[in-house]
Image: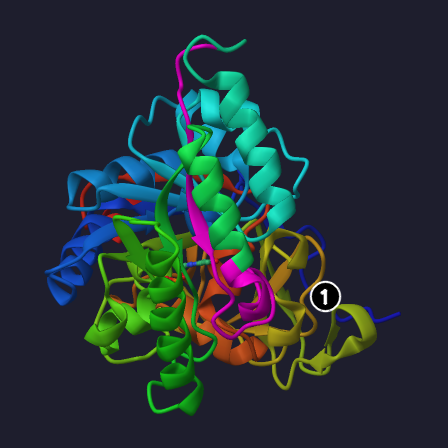
Amino acid sequence: MSAATIDAHPRTAVTNRATLTADLGAVAANTRTIAAHAPGSALMAVVKADGFGHGAADVARTALAAGATRLGVTSVDEALDLRSAGVGAPILSWLNPADADFAAAVAAGIDLAVPSRAHLDAVAAAGSATAPGGPAAGAGPARVHLHLDTGLARDGAPPAEWARLCSAARLAEQRGLIRVDGVMGHLACADVPSDGSNATGRTRFAWGVEVARSLGLRPPHRHLAATAATLTDPRTHHTLVRVGAGLFGIDPSRTVRLRPALTLTAPVVTVRRVRAGTPVGYGHAWTAPETTHLGLLPLGYADGLPRAASGRAEVLVRGRRRPLVGLLSMDQAVVDLGDDEVAPGEIATVFGPGDDGEPTAADWAGWAGTIEHEIVTGIGPRVTRERVAAPAVLRRVR
Ligand SMILES: *Cc1c(COP(=O)(O)O)cnc(C)c1O
């Protein structure tokens, strides 16, 4: 036990709520920038995982107003949530078990990706149930996008099953149960444009489209590119590009300047003065080399600060970068404020667009050995969400 704390009662702040602010002005600007890179193609805004942590419905409305014409999500539940929020644009849902509630999806006008015969049969059955005159009359045939595995071995039909899937889809289309609206693929290594697997993926996709045509399908939408391919390779654009990360300022190919849209702030909850030699936090992983002030932030790995960033991460307080010291805990982090008389209640910026010298999500990803996507999607439910329409997020939260 160390008795090196000088203040008997550390000074404390009145609030301990951290705030995550999504800058919808940045999302709009990024949407326009990306649309300009694929002028001949329609733009699908991918708003899965609550819009990459930025708020799915708000991001959807913003992207639609800025040039996107469709939305993409993983599960039917995510799509239905958007409908419940009043979003009426076309939505494609691409990751579901074959026994998902496709009837509810079709009734809500959700387009469905079909990666297998089992999915096709289930979606066709949902299409018949909701066909005009059917039990849930009105929605008509289910609109599907046949999904070909173009190289991830993750989702999508393997090439060996593709022709049979296309034939069965054509039959279901002729029976009025479905309408094949699209063919889709996905690239494994688009963030590295020179990677040879990109050419393989493009070739396989072109083959898949040709097989579909030869079997009588005429899908108006053909889509392969996500953010990185959209920004680097027009040969992947086809009729539609599916863009998620880029909307939020993340360019996996690091070729285009986009604007980060998320800012995470937290009040300094308490400040204490400690003597040189005071060990701090679990495992005493850090010891104060000299007398200093330590601020406590009400954020930890349960709130999305990766513990792997311990010992490297910094935050901005009073216009200066300051190190987080010791191991990041589940609920709290300690910032070394040095000699500055920072008061409880002053705001620390954990990450933001970087305009004022604060760390970015990319910095955090580097400190933790991960990618920005994991940082922005990982912020936990204890953090208050705010949205601003104007670009000046930091001005507002300060
Ligand atoms: C997430 C996802 C996208 C969007 O990818 P980004 O790189 O974030 O633009 C596109 N397609 C599929 C199938 C996805 O899962």
Report the side of 279 relative to 179 (left or right): right
Q: Is residue 256 above or below residue 302?
A: below
The residue at the point 54 percent across, 18 percent down is 129
Q: Quadrant of ligand 1?
A: bottom left
Check disc 1: other Cα within 10 Å, few if <14, some if 14-19, many if 20+: some
Q: Which region shows up in magenta?
A: 137-163
**Which residue is drawn at the image coordinates 36% and 85% (left, top)?**
199
Above or below, comparing residue 226 to residue 105 in the picture: below
Toward which corner of the image does residue 214 lie, by quadrant? bottom left
For ligand 1, tell me if the residue under mark 1 lies within 8 Å: no
Residue 162 drawn at (x, y percent) = 52, 62
Q: Nearer the viewer, residue 246 or 45?
A: 45
Q: Quadrant of residue 215?
A: bottom left
Residue type pointed to by label 1: Thr
Judge whether residue 127 is colored magenta: no
**Residue at the spot x=65%, y=56% of the render?**
332
Instruction: Give the labeled residue for mark 1.
Output: 5
Observer able to see residue 308? yes
For numbered disc 1, what is the local secondary structure? loop
